[in-house]
Image (tube, rainbow, N blue to C red):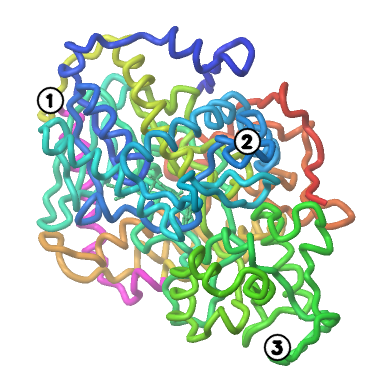
Amino acid sequence: MELRSQVPEGPIEGRWEKHRFEMKLVNPANKRRFNVIVVGSGLAGASAAASLAELGYNVKCFCYQDSPRRAHSIAAQGGINAAKNYQNDGDSVFRLFYDTVKGGDFRAREANVYRLAELSVSIIDQCVAQGVPFAREYGGTLANRSFGGAQVSRTFYARGQTGQQLLLGAYQALERQIGAGKVQMYPRHEMLDLVLIDGRARGIVTRDMVTGAVESWAADAVVLGTGGYGNVFYLATYCKGANATAIWRAYKRGAAFGNPCFTQIHPTCIPVTGEHQSKLTLMSESLRNDGRIWVPRKKGDKRPPDQIPEDERDYYLERKYPSFGNLVPRDVASRNAKQVCDEGRGVGETGYGVYLDFADAIKRLGATAIGEKYGNLFEMYERITAEDPYRVPMRIYPASHYTMGGLWVDYNLMSTIPGLHVMGEANFSDHGANRLGASALMQGLADGYFIIPYTIGHYLASNTLGKVETSNVAFKQVEGEVGARVSKMLSIKGKRTVDSFHRELGRIMWEHCGMARNEAGLKEALQEIPALREQFWSDVNVLGANEEMNQSLEKAGRVADFLELGELMCLDALERRESCGGHFREEYQTPEGEALRDDNNFTHVAAWEYTGPDSRPIRHQEPLSFEYVHLTQRSYK
Ligand SMILES: Cc1cc2nc3c(=O)[nH]c(=O)nc-3n(C[C@H](O)[C@H](O)[C@H](O)COP(=O)(O)OP(=O)(O)OC[C@H]3O[C@@H](n4cnc5c(N)ncnc54)[C@H](O)[C@@H]3O)c2cc1C
């Protein structure tokens, strides 16, 4: 397998411009001759499907929800970054690029990150033109707030519902094309495999989630925008349906998987309360603009927060990182929360929580102003915990939230399978080992609105693609394999529920491949996961039948994939013998407990190649070089 990044030469500021000129074009009249499959209708998928159809391609778009409008992107709360510098506070494309490379702990491709920063400004224009109701200042200009890892205010937002508003914009663009007959939308269709013909991605096989029908779809190119795989931890901030199936099956057909162990554990989630829970809820990072994080100075201090005097509180982020304070990046904030809880200073019944306190902000700005910024988040918190954050500090703790790993793609967003493109959270992304807040929406929309429309054209214009039909033997073979797998799962009729396997896998992953990892723990996980997988395939009880709406069956397929992916994540974490960003190997830390990179040996992307069910995958490397942001130990002090 060869990893050719296809990064253009020349000064970084001009690379995308030059590349756009050098890429081949499909003549407007010829575009209607090409068929493109887009799997996913989140911000990445919907923006890509709408843009490609607008250009004239025939698009088929698939999602597993009942409407594209319900993609997980709708959950995004805090905002989207863009280097508009509306605040006149020193922002620029270069600064956003710099912050993102540094925030990702120097494990992302510089050229991609620069392009992302450059395109960020167009995204805001596009969304405003669509009518996305971004927050505005009194005078009518767009408002901004700050997110972690930045010292400027560059985050555009719509209260705590930014994802929903952006998705409505993309969804309307998509609906317009559905109405125009250029996009055929297939909701409740789950992609269960990828079909290759002559080594190229030429289609997919789906299961109709209402009737159980297994069907094939052919195209000239396939685009995946299927989101992240953080639900491998079972408890996570993702929607329950988020899964790895599309990218995992593509991996097994030959697409390299980049940096699978790079996951983001978000510092501000509502803490776990017990075994009964099936998911966790995020409290947006934007709250760290005004909320102050603290724990009692004394171990085991169980007094209610209002009875702990100021001088007995430890505002540990402000103390340790005076320049960034509560707005340090997520990996740093999460690790510090874990550390104070491990020291016995955590709050709440379990001791796994820290306070996020708005008392000072309310005193300074008033409850109304705070409500205007975060009202819906406060309400959500109160509904879940029965505590009013206007009066009592929120309790928060880190949880699985985002995956920086994903399918490896080149500068054109193409995977190692020709014709298979991957966007948004599903690709291994521009965020290196740690994503800065408000950068996922930016990346998904940059990919969908502004990159894929060019690079797909280049692929289609550069290759002679014969016509393929779903009657081709390759489709029939994959359909057979998909059907056999579904039947196998239904036939086991064991004693354990699908959820019990998922929960157990999540515990293993959290314990050994979560916020902190070490060699012994990872080796233990690499024993435990295959054993659990074997048990799954002999003892799982999948209820119901195929020919009906069957959520037990849907979950079983996804958990089966997580049981394989979890192992690859642990292997990747084991082999990366350094700490960087969200990947914290306990053996490699500075005397102050910060992540200690090994730039001599690990300044690369690890891209894994599948070699069969019982053999170890091959670890390839794409070297990374840093010409514009020089490799340094990250400091937020
Ligand atoms: C609670 C929460 C809040 C967040 N807030 C922010 C924020 O404020 N700012 C920010 O930048 N980021 C935020 N993020 C991250 C961000 O929301 C996501 O990274 C981003 O929305 C992912 O978009 P996507 O289009 O890549 O995937 P998704 O929105 O996850 O969409 C995936 C799509 O793929 C489809 N799909 C998946 N698998 C299949 C399959 N096998 N077959 C068919 N269809 C399939 C789904 O139906 C869906 O349409 C937040 C994340 C969470 C969990």
* Amino acid carrying mark 2 in the image: Leu
x and y percentages locating residue 405 in the rendered image: 53, 43
Alpha carbons under labels 1 and 3: distance apart: 69 Å
Residue nearest the observer in this picture, 505 or 290: 290
Q: Quadrant of residue 394?
A: bottom right
Residue at image x 56%, y 64%? Answer: 399
Residue at image x 13%, y 58%? Answer: 210
Q: Is residue 618 magenta?
A: no
Of the numbered discs 1 and 3, the one sitting upstream in the chain is 3
Q: Going by the picture, which residue comes out furthest to the front? A: 139
Residue nearest the observer in this picture, 596 or 55: 55
> Taking 626 as reference, is 568 above or below it?
below
Residue wearing tag 1? 469
Q: Which mark is residue 96?
A: 2
* Circle 1 or circle 2, nearest the eye: 2
Residue at image x 49%, y 48%? Answer: 139
Alpha carbons under labels 2 and 3: distance apart: 39 Å
How many marks can you see? Answer: 3
Of the numbered discs 2 and 3, the one sitting upstream in the chain is 2
**SS class, disc 1:** loop
Q: Is residue 492 magenta?
A: yes
> Taking 570 as reference, is 342 above or below it?
below
Tell me, yes or no, whether the two marked residues, 1 and 2, touch with CB atoms within 8 Å: no
x and y percentages locating residue 308 in the rendered image: 77, 87
Viewed as shown, does residue 206 lie left or right of 567?
left
* Amino acid carrying mark 3 in the image: Asp
Span shown in magenta: 472-500
Residue wearing tag 3? 306
Dot 2 crowding, Cα within 10 Å, few <14, some 14–19, many 20+: many
Dot 1 crowding, Cα within 10 Å, few <14, some 14–19, many 20+: some
